[in-house]
Amino acid sequence: MNICASPLAELPPASGFAAAGRRRQRVLAVGVIGPGRVGSALLEQLRAAQPRLLRDSALELKLCGVVASKRMWLDCDDTELNGRHGGAQIWRPNDLDAFAGHVRGSDGRHALLIDCSANDEVAARYPRWLAAGLHVVTPNKLAGSGPLSRWQAIRAACAGGARFRYEATVCAGLPVVQTLRDLLDTGDDLLAVDGMFSGTLAWLCNRHDGRQPFSALVREAHALGYTEPDPRDDLSGLDVARKLVILAREAGRALSLEDVDLQSLVPPALAALPLDDCMRRLDELDAPMAAKLAEARAEGGVLRHVAQLDRHGRASVRLLVLPASHAFAHTRLTDNIVQFSTRRYCDNPLIVQGPGAGPEVTAAGVFTDLLRIAESLEARA
Amino acid sequence: MNICASPLAELPPASGFAAAGRRRQRVLAVGVIGPGRVGSALLEQLRAAQPRLLRDSALELKLCGVVASKRMWLDCDDTELNGRHGGAQIWRPNDLDAFAGHVRGSDGRHALLIDCSANDEVAARYPRWLAAGLHVVTPNKLAGSGPLSRWQAIRAACAGGARFRYEATVCAGLPVVQTLRDLLDTGDDLLAVDGMFSGTLAWLCNRHDGRQPFSALVREAHALGYTEPDPRDDLSGLDVARKLVILAREAGRALSLEDVDLQSLVPPALAALPLDDCMRRLDELDAPMAAKLAEARAEGGVLRHVAQLDRHGRASVRLLVLPASHAFAHTRLTDNIVQFSTRRYCDNPLIVQGPGAGPEVTAAGVFTDLLRIAESLEARA
């Protein structure tokens, strides 16, 4: 081929491209499951973004329905994201598959279900929905950290082209899952993940300086709304372990929750008590935590609640004594932080840090997943 | 519509989706301009990833050519990324538009030019290439921080569907441009960007503790290869200012280099000297830097080289005294760091930190852009 005979100038501009390019309008039907705090924030963000997405990205979002635990709102098709979901329109008994079928429609359009519930029954339906061509996005950790067989069924169901995304399951809106994905997809090798994935435990560790007993800090955090209604849900580290499992699976490790060396901060004697009784006996936390703090100080370090995945796939969630120079020693109050050590980032890791919880930033993480899926959609007649 | 009459189970699975899904093979023709350190690292990464991309993402990369400053290698079409670019095959006089035409081909295929040169003449051709339907990816800052009119021409040229991406222009492989894009695209409002965008200046500030004169540190960094061949290229802050301009434009600010309040560390007397003369007189840096350090210590703070964009669009690059508790006070040696303060991330910012230079991580940033473009490609016959 003599390229001098076909310089760019002599070809018609954009041949074959403009016609097939991104400016052709794409339509994405959206159904939201679980209009709680995150779901409501998301609906608000989508509504606000709709004119801009249509103008700048030729993307039309059609909100086809919202389903709550006991009712659903349908047929917003023609009104797009106009906020009408706030008032009950037509609603029918909650049937999740019927809802999914409604969002998918029968005209071969692109359709996305967003699961903002924290409901295992919903997560159990992802494989079925994905196999039927519906994309699924969720901030719900139950699928990513639940039974490995279900996780594998979800991956297998994506083979047909539907996509499953879950950025907001780890550190809410911070770019964590996508960053790990990009490292791996560009051929890097993951050596270790270290993270502080609980804003509550970060706050408690930051404040735990010996001036007041640990139980007093837990009570303060509880009163401020920093903890779950039952603070043992934070102190157990289970939620942190779920996030670590999600990242480990993203990196190709067949890890399950029971494989994580999870060291709960809740003394066994408190674990099974009714909440009120537990709160009364919270000072049983104090002696072991004071001992840990003394240990850290003897070493000149700080106490931090850390999730770790090493290069052999070993996963742990526990209190660690870290040197005062460690990046985790300088986090701010409730910040989450994650560091990826890889073959390319080996001397110094790649770090992402910031607020890792809250309805608005979690919804934004979900929205980012929606945009990533939308970018990959083909225009359809 | 009675959705109960059309539950998901009764629709054929994946109707209309599997056939149009992502498993249909997509072909992306790739041409690389500038096989220097970054370009060579990229070619190696692409070659290694090729079998995996084809298997997992149904993406076939075709390396159609590599062009250096004085020659080009073409017609790797049929051999894909098999490393043959290492040996000169057919080569012809360097004609960039002819090269672009060759990569684009005439069959309407997807085509991508990757500019790893640092050549303004190449950057000047982006609008033309984009208008002709070629995607462009670059780690080269000249377009993003060059004349605003050219930048606007580039944006306008993307209207036809071709995409221009440049993640690796800011902090190499760290997820910075995409993170800002996602914040904005999901409806967040940017309040401020603060960053340390020079590993060299970070290292110098970290090491500058008064025990040795600043010029000795510069000589040490120069000897270690941490600086550009002419260390004034680092000390001027110009490269940092370019990165800030790129982020400001990403956030919609019509900013140019000359709008940045850029405070060079190079005394005016040294700025115009030949390199050898400058290196001999480097101790002229010492008195002003010692005074800055004394000022920082008097305030109980640390000295850092910081780029800032505020909510009014004012941009500055300068030495700042920061409190010892500031996130920038605890960075590691040559790390880059960027923090985005937004409406949603207002109490604590979103932070990305890590090594922000080097051929491998820069190439990975380019590769990530390639993957993002590939995700959006439609399968074509």
Image (cartoon, coloured by chain):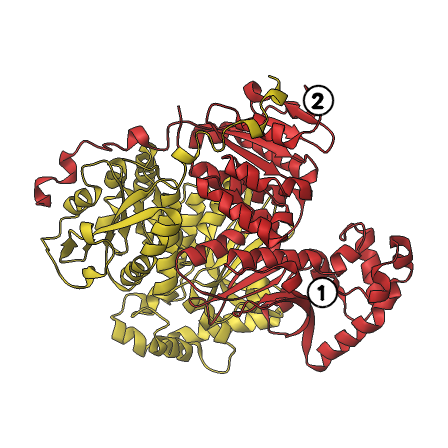
Chain colours: A yellow, B red
Identified by mark 1, the residue type is Asn
Asked if one can make out residue A312 in the rendered structure from this viewpoint, the answer is no
Residue at 20% from the left image edge and 36% from the top image edge: A107
Compared to residue B20, the image places residue B286 above or below, namely below
User: From the viewer's perspective, is B264 left or right of A359?
Assistant: right
Nearer mark to the viewer, of 1 and 2: 2
For label 2, the crowd category at 10 Å Cα-Cα, with few meaning under 14, some 14 to 19 and many 20 or more, is few
The image quarter in which residue B71 lies: top right
Q: Is mark 1 on a helix, strand or loop?
A: helix
Residue at 42% from the left image edge and 35% from the top image edge: A18
Q: Which of marks 1 and 2 is nearer the N terminus?
A: 2
Question: How far across and how far down the image is residue A86, in percent?
Answer: 19, 63
Residue at 66% from the left image edge and 24% from the top image edge: B73
User: From the viewer's perspective, is B224 left or right of B46?
Assistant: right
> Residue B278 versus residue B197: which sits nearer the camera?
B278
Please state the chain letter of the residue tagged with numbered disc 1 in the rendered image: B
Q: What element carries label 2?
A: loop
> Residue B324 versus residue B275: which sits nearer the camera?
B275
Question: How far across and how far down the image is residue A302, in percent?
Answer: 56, 69
> Residue B380 versus residue B86: which sits nearer the camera?
B380
Q: Quadrant of the N terminus of chain A?
A: top right
Asked if one can make out residue A6 in the rendered structure from this viewpoint, the answer is yes
User: From the viewer's perspective, is B194 left or right of B73?
Assistant: left
Residue marked by disc 2: B88
The mark found on residue B206 in the picture is 1
Identified by mark 2, the residue type is Ala
Compared to residue B39, the image places residue A124 above or below, namely below
Q: Are marks 1 and 2 in contact (CB under 8 Å)?
A: no
Please state the chain letter of the residue tagged with numbered disc 2 in the rendered image: B
Q: How many numbered markers are drawn?
A: 2
The image quarter in which residue A276 lies: bottom left
User: From the viewer's perspective, is A321 left or right of A61?
Assistant: right
